[in-house]
Image: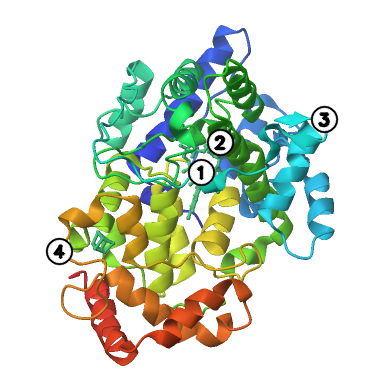
Amino acid sequence: MVDPAKFHPTRLHFLVSSARHLAEELRAEGFTVDYAKAATTLDGIAAAKKRHGIQTVVAAHQSSFRLQAALESIGVQCVENNFFLTPRPLFNSWAESQKSHLMENFYRKQRVRLGILMVGSEPVGGQWNFDAENRDPLPKDHAPAKYLEHSTDAIDAEVAAELGIEPPTEWATDRAGALKVLKHFLANHFETFGRFEDAMNSTDWAVHHSLLSPYLNNGLLHASEVITAALKKFDTGAIPIASCEAFIRQIIGWREYINGMYWYLGESYKEENQLQATRPLLPLFSDSSKTEMNCVRSIVSDVEKRSWVHHIPRLMVLSNLALISSVNPQAYLEWMRNQFIDASDWVMVPNVIGMGVHADGGRMMTKPYAAGGAYISRMSDYCKGCAFDPKKRTGDNACPFTTLYWDFLAEHHEEFAGNHRMAQQLAGLKRLTDLPQTRERAKEVLDGLSAGTI
Ligand SMILES: Cc1cc2nc3c(=O)[nH]c(=O)nc-3n(C[C@H](O)[C@H](O)[C@H](O)COP(=O)(O)OP(=O)(O)OC[C@H]3O[C@@H](n4cnc5c(N)ncnc54)[C@H](O)[C@@H]3O)c2cc1C
Ligand code: SF4
């Protein structure tokens, strides 16, 4: 059961204030709106039915199995949710026809079906994928770009007062503000989005990411208008194909694939724990001061401040740490879902269970996203200010990521032995001459992480 009391206040503020703004906008357009507060959605619907003497309630398909079942249990009629570009039956027929559900295969079909970045039957630029050009770290002299600060109004202030916080200014809470974010991204960050999409930085909280997920997920923006605006900008010739393709892939590929897979994989998928990870949630996730690891402290502190970090900190730092320290996937999922401004079951469950911590035994991703400190060192500036050394796996100043990465491979080498995509990593494991010492150090690291002292 989701407990809103545990939600990040910025997330709650965004959701509630956006809803109240929408109610006002609809009233201004002449609609009759009954905005009601209730303890639960079901209580709210029951009270509204009574108030208005309504028999039939119609709603869009919900964002989780739980809510969907709850609404159906009281006879609410659900119609297809138009927040997405791919009808569920179409996705299911694709999924049923596949042996392994590679996002890349789905994405190519989407490009053809939707006629996006295509010349006849060929992809624009002659390639489907420009990932190889899109893995640069930021240059040493990178100067963070200015991000939009949103002005707040009486509704924002009212919601903030109810939550006992100052109104956040990083996130828009109405359609006009969401459109400003889209415009700002296209003008200032789209060109470099692709090249630096994997880069992380301690002084630049969003790098060149779009910051659009909250608005796409709560309906303030629609995926099709974002794509249309992006393609229009690309047609001016100002945007390299590698950036445009990378951004389009996120929206028509990843976003649609994740939603399709959530419903395709079924409700029990969320409970998967194939690596049998049982460690309780590490204290550092709930309190950034509970770790000496510079990367984790900085990223968790960004989550504390804004309820958001971009894809690579989510995947390669937070989830990677949960994976290689065997944190229970459901405990980690609950933390992520409560903390992130753009969270919903349809998007959190596959991203965490499948992509983040490989708890599904590889039903979504062909291999786990496990990495040592070398990856974080290459893609960020975190290691410079850290008490640990990303190159070391033993000793007091060994990087916990590096130590735990090898320990994780050693622990699970039998499960991964049949996976050809893990062959290189397992061959590396075989060559380690200090594996016993590394595994000894891993025990100390795990104890320290559980105690909140590393
Ligand atoms: C462990 C984990 C948890 C995640 N949880 C969420 C979540 O709760 N909500 C959420 O919207 N995204 C989630 N993502 C996906 C992705 O990290 C965010 O969509 C992205 O960071 C949002 O920032 P942005 O809008 O600047 O995205 P950009 O990098 O600018 O990408 C543009 C858009 O593409 C879409 N997108 C890209 N990747 C994904 C993806 N894997 N799944 C779904 N949509 C995607 C988003 O709508 C995003 O706004 C998660 C990823 C991981 C690894
Ligand atoms: S040395 Fe390890 S813990 Fe420290 S910032 Fe680098 S990757 Fe993170």
Q: Where is residue 8? Give x, y as percent.
A: 35, 45
Give the CA separation, mark 1 to mark 3: 24 Å
Q: Residue at x 63, y 26 (%)?
A: 227
Amino acid type, mark 1: Glu
- Label 3, label 2: how far apart the Cα atoms are: 19 Å
Residue 242 image label: 2
| Residue contact at pointers 1 and 2, CB within 8 angstroms | yes
**Nearest to viewer (mark 1 / mark 4):** 1
Secondary element at tag 4: loop
**Residue density around tag 1, few if under 14, some if 14–19, many if 20 or more, within 10 Å:** few
Residue holding disc 4: 387
The numbered mark, 4 or 3, whose residue comes first in the sequence reads 3
Nearer to us: label 4 or label 3: 3
Vertical arrangement, residue 53 with respect to residue 270, above or below: above
- Check disc 1 and report the residue beneath it: 133
**Quick one: 245 or 318, which is closer to the camera?**
245
Q: Secondary structure at mark 1?
A: helix
Out of 130 and 71, give the one closest to the viewer: 130
Classify mark 2: residues with Cα within 10 Å, few (<14), some (14-19) or many (20+): many
The secondary structure type at the circle numbered 2 is: helix
Q: Residue at x 56, y 32 (%)?
A: 216
First reached walking from the N terminus: tag 4 or tag 2? 2
Residue at the location (78% across, 44% down)?
109
Task: Give the mark nearest the N terminus, 1 or 3.
Answer: 3
Say above or below: 264 vs 280: above
Q: Is residue 104 above or below residue 406?
A: above
Q: Which mark is residue 45?
A: none
Labels 1 and 4: the sequence-earlier one: 1
Q: Residue at x 62, y 75 (%)?
A: 420
Residue 91 in percent (x, y) is at 78, 48
Q: Secondary structure at mark 3?
A: loop
